[in-house]
Amino acid sequence: MEENNKLVLAEDIKTAEPQEAPASPARKKLPLTHSLPAKVAAFILAVIAAFAFFGSAALGFLAFESNFYTTSKEEVRKNNFKGQVISDASEAANVLYQDSVNGKVAAKEIVEGKNISCITIDFSEDIVNKTWTYKSGKEPGDDTFGFYLYNFDDHFINRSSEGAAGAKGNAKVYVALNKDFTYADRYSLINTYLNLIYSMRYMTYVVAFVSLIVALSCFVFLMCASGRHQTSDKPEASFGTKIPFDLLAGSAFFILFGFAAIIYQARNREIVEVIFGLFLMGVSLCIGLGLCMSLATRIKLGSWWKNTVIYMILHFIWKCIKNLCKLLLKTPLVWRTSLIAASIFLLDLIFVGFADEAEKVIYIFVRSVLLFPALIYIAFMLRKLLNGSKDLAEGDLDNKVSTKGMFWDFRTAADNLNSISNGMALAVEERTKSDRMKTELITNVSHDIKTPLTSIINYSDLIMKEPAGSEKITEYAEVLHRQSEKLKRLIDDLVETSKANTGNLEVILAPCSVNELLSQAAGEYEQKMEDCGLTLVSEIPEDTISIMADGRRLWRVFDNLLNNACKYALSGTRVYMSLKEENGNALITFKNTSREALNISAEELMERFVRGDKSRNSGTEGNGLGLAIAKSLTELQNGKLDLSIDGDLFKAEIRFPLI
């Protein structure tokens, strides 16, 4: 049985198709600017191309200066050798003239070991060593020179015959250079330079142009690639970018300065000087290109100037100045003025006691230049403040003091005057509003009291005129009772509103379940709302939500809001009542759609004797005290009542802290 199972399993394995491994997500291919080998290759190529450009440009310039394009090679060679020949001959002539005993030995040491085949110096008759000749034994070439040296102040120099007046003597010099430059001296170096320049006098411009294009292309590529890495498409900071840029540039400058000093010390060693010069050029190109790449990376990262020592120093100085100014501004005005006056007085004493007349004049001039604009500025600012206070005293509250150009205490004084003006304007507006509200309050109270009182008087008169036993007396008595109850409710509401506003209403706070009160209110008003054509939708959570409140007063708040909905909600719509927890508060919300257009703000709707329809003669019962009483009672219980109106949507939100 086991063997059969193994055979079946083996067949299943053979027939099963191999499942392909899930393909790994394709890695985003980054451009060439993110490749490190590409950047290294571009860096090396840029340095080599720049080296070739400067070298070929220098060769081209030397070829142009040496007239290789208009003069024969032999003539150019002589012109370039002549300066060094005159220098060596002058040095030999001077030692011969100054030392008649050992001069010949010293002169020989000067020319020996150089590519000079022979040299002859023939002095005039008044010179002791009249003729001196040196021969190296090397075969002379075609480069021969003949000239005169003239003696001025016991020193032989080369002068033209026109400029030889006043010379004490002269020396006729003949020099022939070696045919083959066997010694590594300046003659050999000049010969190598000249041969190189002559052979490349035309090609050098092509090389310079091509190398410039290559160098610029590599430079642009490196500037784009700076800060780019293989792991990210965004520029990233490296260790080098964390070093302040000016410190990095200064360090590079000192390194190059050190190399230049070494080259200067080796200036008399031609080959060493050339090698060090080429090395310095290569190092300069590498350092310069590296600094450019570092700067490009810093620019891509943003705010590169903040990572400099200069910025840090200036920022520190600026912070010190700001802190000093803040400290000075916090100092009282009298002390601040005294400090400034004492500083000026101290400077006066210093310059009077120690400065000379010219320095005193300069100091007085500078002090006057600084103080005169300051005094003019103070005068202008005081005039603006004076005009502003004058307008304020005359009752012109709309004219504000302009703070443009004002600083320190002047701006503070102007802001204070403007604040006083704003405060007075607000006070006048509040006073006008209060007077208007008092007038409206008296009018509304008079109207609401007059209506039931008139009915009571009229029906009482009718009852008195009816005969005893008349059936109308009962009808009139019912109207009389109803109007009396309405008048009583109005007076009770007035008394309760007055007590709530003055804080004289007794409130006993105790733990209260909002769920139960809202459920009771929903049960009581459900039938009443159905009679008004409304549907009550209540959203009350099952979890108990408790607050600190007075149950009777809180019930009155709910009663007023639901009663308002019955009076003013549009028939056939829904009235929403909800309860939830929000930010540590119990949020109770009442929403309904108004029957009349709510052409009034929520703030005005909270005022006493204000109704949403703004008509005291409409058929809707109410005196406009319901919302005012609800707000006052809510605030007495440490709650908050907010109203909002959006079109015909009326929304009331009550918040109480949870316990």
Image (cartoon, rainbow, N blue to C red):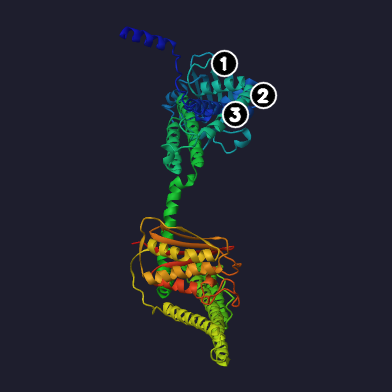
- Residue 356, quarter of the rendered image: bottom left
Q: How far apart are marks 1 and 2 (CA)?
A: 20 Å
Compared with 506, 565 (above or below) is above
Helix, strand or loop at mark 2: loop
Crowding at label 1, few (<14), some or many (≥20) Cα neighbours within 10 Å? Answer: some
Foreground pick, 329 / 259 = 329
Residue found 54% across the figure and 19% down from its top: 177
Helix, strand or loop at mark 1: strand
Residue found 49% across the figure and 64% down from its top: 527
- Residue on which disc 3 sits: 212
- Residue 199, quarter of the rendered image: top right
- Residue on which disc 1 sits: 141
Compared with 455, 345 (above or below) is above
Residue found 53% across the figure and 70% down from its top: 603
- Residue on which disc 2 sits: 71
Q: Quadrant of the N terminus?
A: top left
- Residue 265, quarter of the rendered image: top left
Compared with 544, 128 (above or below) is above
Helix, strand or loop at mark 3: helix
- Please tell me which of labels 1 and 2 falls first in the chain: 2
